[in-house]
Amino acid sequence: MTDGPPRAIAHLRLALSPDWSIGPGKARLLEAIEATGSIAAAGRRLKMSYKRAWNLVEELNAGFREPLVTSTRGGSTGGGAGLTPAGRSVLDGYRRIEAQAEAAVAAEVAALRALLAPKNGGPAGQSVADEGESDGEGRGSDEV
């Protein structure tokens, strides 16, 4: 774990309907697709299988009226993937809601962190349990 507070205060999962939600894993997948231009490369970046990444893209595309991700097949001309305007809108909306939620709970989280035991002689506010946490990039499908 790096010094300082974790990237996100909480992992926010939005239940947009009784059978559909979006959370940090799907948001990271959309960001990785946008950054890499490829579903396969996005999956590798997030340490998830190609099949898992494709299944999540299909789920994302089926969950909304318009697809969130477009893709072209590979081959001699190469393939690729990217976010549609709807995909960009969903990702931006999720990140705005996440930021608003973090701002709303920041004081309570700070109060709880102040109660944590010191980390192996380090400063108060970091527990031994924090050592194994990451920003979620390497957790793959358990965060999706």
Image (cartoon, helix red, strand yellow):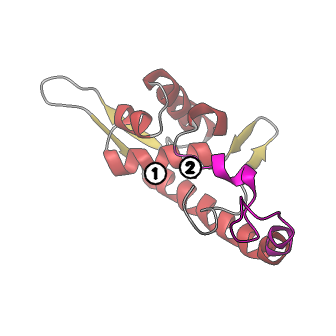
Farthest residue, direction front: 121
Q: Is 106 within the magenta?
A: no
Quadrant into which the C terminus falls: top right
Task: Say which residue appears at 57% left-offset and 38% top-offset.
Answer: 60
Dividing the picture into quadrants, the one containing residue 122 is bottom right
Q: Nearer the viewer, residue 81 or 41?
A: 41
Side of 110 where 139 appears, left or right:
left
Q: Which residue is mark 1?
A: 31
- Left or right? Give the position of 28 relative to 76: right
For the stretch drawn in magenta, what is the main secondary structure?
A: loop
Q: Which mark is residue 27?
A: 2
Residue at the spot x=43%, y=25% of the render? 50
Q: Are marks 2 and 1 in contact (CB under 8 Å)?
A: yes
Q: What stretch of residues is rendered in magenta?
A: 110-137
Residue at (60%, 32%) from the top-left corner?
A: 141
Horizontal and vertical percent for residue 84? Answer: 42, 49
- Up the image or down, 38 lies above or below 52; here it is below
At numbered mark 2, what does the secondary structure look like: helix, strand or loop? helix
Q: Amino acid at mark 2?
A: Ala
Q: Quadrant of residue 116?
A: bottom right
Where disc 1 sits, the SS reads helix
Q: Exactly how many numbered labels are in the figure? A: 2
Kindly give the residue lying farthest to the left in the view shown.
Answer: 76
Q: For residue 113, which quarter of the picture?
A: bottom right
Place of residue 81 in the rendered image (x, y in percent of width and height, measured from the top left)? 34, 39
